[in-house]
Image (cartoon, rainbow, N blue to C red):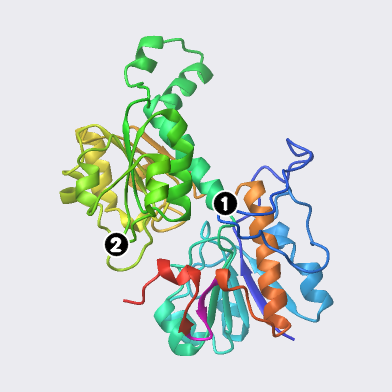
Amino acid sequence: MSKILCVLYPDPVTGFPPVYARDAIPAIHAYPNGQSTPMPSGPLGFTPGALIGSVSGELGLRRYLESHGHELVVTSDKKGVDSVFDHHLPDADVVISQPFWPAYLTAKRIAKARKLKLALTAGIGSDHVDLKAAVSRGITVAEVTFSNSISVAEHVVMTILALVRNYLPSHLMAKNGGWNIADCVARSYDIEGMHFGTLGAGRIGQAVLRRLKPFDMTLHYYDPHRLPDELEQELGLTYHETPASLVKVCDVVNLQTPLYPATQGFVNDAFLAKFKRGAYLVNTARGALCDRDAIARALTSGQLAGYGGNVWFPQPAPVDHPWRSMPNHGMTPHISGTSLSAQARYAAGTLEILQNFFDGKPIRKDYLIVDGGRLVGTGANAYKLT
């Protein structure tokens, strides 16, 4: 018998919906690159389209795990040595976490997790796991690649339109009984004709570029790996060899860069000074890519016209985090990749990974970051150990 320790975000404060807004979600069978969606064997332990990403939803795993003799512990309590997470960690064989409510598997915690064999991210983004410590211990690290990439890309496009069109203050004006049209449109522009650039053109970055092309924006990108010529021609992309080259010409900049030591805090005062005055910055990658206070200063000075996204550091963000109160922002909690549609895919992928792991079968290469102590696989391109 194995012990599976699963850390999920808390249940809705208002209670689970008695009736969902929609009766079903579309069935997606493959991703844009041809990769198939998760394919677990046997029945799912959940109804697609239901809220299963919070504690009581348990990612729909309990039926499968308990029917195979395993123990499942699900909690949202993950902070501090007295947390439920830390209490169960020493004898956990598998830890499941999410990017939205990350259980940080630091080197210190990994040292305490004497039985840990698999660190599984329900979603995309395993930077909350100390990969160097995982490699040294021979732990496998996996995530459900592509499961919520399109969900995040949609959130990016939504955020761009909300910021540039000044939607959020205008909505509040209507909600609060006002009709001050001049105040609403004083900061409202069209994105048509603007220059958009993404720093990072992997799965999510490319999906954003594809979705913005019909808006008649001029599209730019920076990535350590240049995209194929045919894709650049198809989307009309301009490639930049440095981030600085891109941000000085773009009206809207999207951060889609992986977080590792070399990129942590690289969006600082000096880098923001290279932006066009009045540019918009969207970040759905990781909050720690940005110098927290530099972002607030740039919005206050007008160097940035708006900042939006859904990633913070730490997560959850404290009540006094300056991004909550800075001007002209469009921040949300970390929700972009955990729509009800995305939950169905990453829960199914989590089940698939667990089934293969317990059956002694290879985990799909697409999902692997560290395979028993060896940095491997598609996901490994986005991660570095130093």
x and y percentages locating residue 167 in the rendered image: 44, 25
Residue 128 drawn above or below residue 255: below
Identify the residue under disc 2.
263
- Left-right relation of 18 to 273: right
Q: Tell me which residue sits at (68%, 72%) in the image.
A: 73
Q: Secondary structure at mark 1?
A: loop
Using the rendered image of the protein, determine whether residue 372 is visible from the camera's viewpoint: yes
Q: Image quarter for residue 350?
A: bottom right
| Quadrant of the image containing the C terminus | bottom left
Which quadrant holds residue 106?
bottom left
The correct choice, above or below, for 260 with respect to 278 in the image is: below
Residue 185: horizontal and vertical position, in percent?
Answer: 37, 16
Where residue 64 appears, as percent x and y from the top left, is 79, 71
Report the quarter where the N terminus lies: bottom right
* Magenta span main SS: strand
Q: Mark 1 highlights which residue?
A: 32
The magenta segment: 368-373
Give the camera-side residue of 251 and 86: 251
